[in-house]
Amino acid sequence: MQMIIASRLVDGRVVFMDAEAGWPVSIDDGVLLDTEEDTERLLVVAEKAVQNCEIVDPYPIEVVVENGERRPAEVREAIRAFGPSVRTDQLVESE
Amino acid sequence: MYRYDEFDDKLVGERVEQFRRQVERRLAGELSEDQFKPLRLMNGLYMQLHAYMLRVNVPYGSLSSKQMRAFAHIARTYDKGFGHFTTRQNIQYNWVKLEETPDLLRELADVEVTAIQSSGNCVRNITSDQYAGRAEEELADPRIYCELLRQYSVLHPEFSYLPRKFKIAVTGSPTDRAAVALHDIGLRMHRNDAGEMGFEVLVGGGQGRTPFIAHTIREWLAPEHVLSYVEAILRIYNIFGRRDNINKARIKIIVNQMGIDKYRELVDEEWERIRDGALKLPQEEIDRIDAYFAPPVYETLEDLTTELGALREADTDFDRWMGSNVIAHKIDGYSIVNITLKAPGRVPGDINADDMDAIADLADRYSLGEIRVSHRQNLTLVDVQQRDLHTLWQELDALTLATPNLGQLTDIICCPGLDYCNLANARSIPLADDINQHFLDVDHLALVGDLTVNISGCMNACGHHHVGNIGILGVDKRGKEYFQLTLGGSSDEGASLGDRLGRGLPQEEVPGAIEAIVDCYLEVREDGERFLDAYRRVGIEPFKDAVYGTADNKEVA
């Protein structure tokens, strides 16, 4: 399955496209895409969000769902989704 | 230290307001990301994996305590309470917001700090020796020429859109702590046969995917010509440097393709044309800048080495710290104190806002209010009276900033890696910590002695892996993080690139591999021989056998 990931323009935060073309920060709130056609269709919608200065650099990522939990297949995208694997205590405190 | 004059103030202030308007236009949709990107990069603002990252210049690695406190304030107000010192003596903030960046830059400008040209295809922060002006063996203070070059290169209209970024480093000491041979231009101060002070000029060094040690383009250059000669080098690069391929755009590629003799010929031809023009430095101008770096008024003190010896004998921890982190000063009764930002559980180069404030206070109380940043991502107090060393050590120890590992195996250079960086292939920070946790015995580390370990999370080599005595490069191998080891690299006056040891290793095997390398070194070393010297003497084979055994030596990932 795939999701659309991007960076929010105002602060660079990682966001995921949801079913209403919104951009929440949690991977759990994004929309899962079953087909290539769905991904291509939503990338067109994402491009409008780029034009509207909501986000930059949207692209699709592979996502694995196990026991109801979503996790990007690639290490890089998992780090984007869940944050750095270091300084986790300080980063959580500062949210 | 250099202080802004009215021109600096005006220029920096105008630049902040210019960037404020650019940000407003971007947020209003008047600029696309493609249009905005080069503008934000010229102001040090990157988009990384999780947020915008702002790189702030620390010119030639020199900071006042006031500026360090401003860094702490920025960390608390605009970031998540910490910053990261880099191998180019800068500080990076990993969590800034685009909309807040102009205000952040305004606050930095108030303490005479900028992010101008900390990114982009232009002349970056001029770097130098962290002991400049204080080292016992130094011939001349390089900061005067760093500052002249800074003023010359900031917002230079001809060199604001070079083929690629451009890095200059200057050292005034025969001991090279500024890695000048790994820079686009390296300037090494020395005396010619007539006894006159000048510069050996090196060109075309660099790391990244195609590493090169720089060539000497001129054996000796009079200080009055430093700007004109640098301009000639830059102009030839601007004309001949490749703009069609980002991987071949650095000056090192053109110098090595063309050959140093041809490059020299072109530079000299251009230099002859401009050398006695507007860029020839009048002695009064050199003197004017020199005055900013005049030595502080030192007290007349006796050398306290003997008295300190008694304290060292009474306290093993103090003794270790003195032996590792405290360096001789050119003035009797004073010492240079290094604070390594490397310890188990600590991200190399990272520092919390509270620690920044604490170090600023220590600098004020014990070191005339100045702090230096080294390219090995550590901090230095350069004017500490020997009679204060024990008290200072106690205060640093209370802050857990007295790790006695300067230049040792755990004093690791480490890029942000895949935890933060858009370009990285592998995480370097967790590996640095694994190594730190593996080598906890400080006496063993002291026994091993000088041994640099440098980690990069990708071939762009921000962690200087090519020139680590042990270099570690993170690679992506079919979706998994692996690490390739190199041995024998060095960034000092005998600079060399490391040799690849063998196939890449998964993260969990790297600390053990380093232990095998260290054990092999201890076995082969002769009296007082550093790791690097032993490696150069015996070659790579014993180390290959130690890490891989003899069976799969030849296998290369």
Image (cartoon, coloured by chain):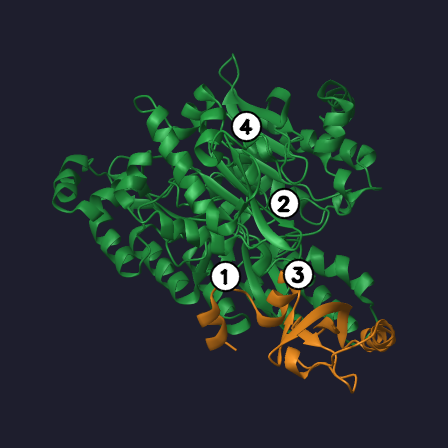
Task: Measuring from the top left, give residue B363's x and y in whole percent.
Answer: 35, 54
B481 or B92: nearer the eye?
Answer: B481
The circle on residue B496 is: 4
Q: Residue at x 76, y 30 (%)?
A: B254
B203 or B18: nearer the eye?
Answer: B203
* Residue identifier under label 1: B83
* Residue identifier under label 3: B45
Task: Measuring from the top left, give residue B455's x and y in whole percent.
Answer: 52, 45
Check disc 1 and give the amino acid type. Gly
Query: Going by the image, does A38 lie left or right of B428?
Result: right
User: Disc 2 to disc 1, how far (Cα)?
Assistant: 26 Å
Reading the chain from its start, which is encountered first: label 3 or label 4? 3
Q: Give yes or no for contact between labels 1 and 3 (Cβ–Cβ under 8 Å).
A: no
* Residue identifier under label 2: B151
Q: Chain of mark 2?
A: B
* In this view, the mark in front (3 or 2): 3
Which chain shows up in green? B
Check disc 2 and give the amino acid type. Gln
Against B251, is B387 above or below?
below
Neighbor class of circle 1 (other Cα within 10 Å; few <14, some 14-19, many 20+) is many
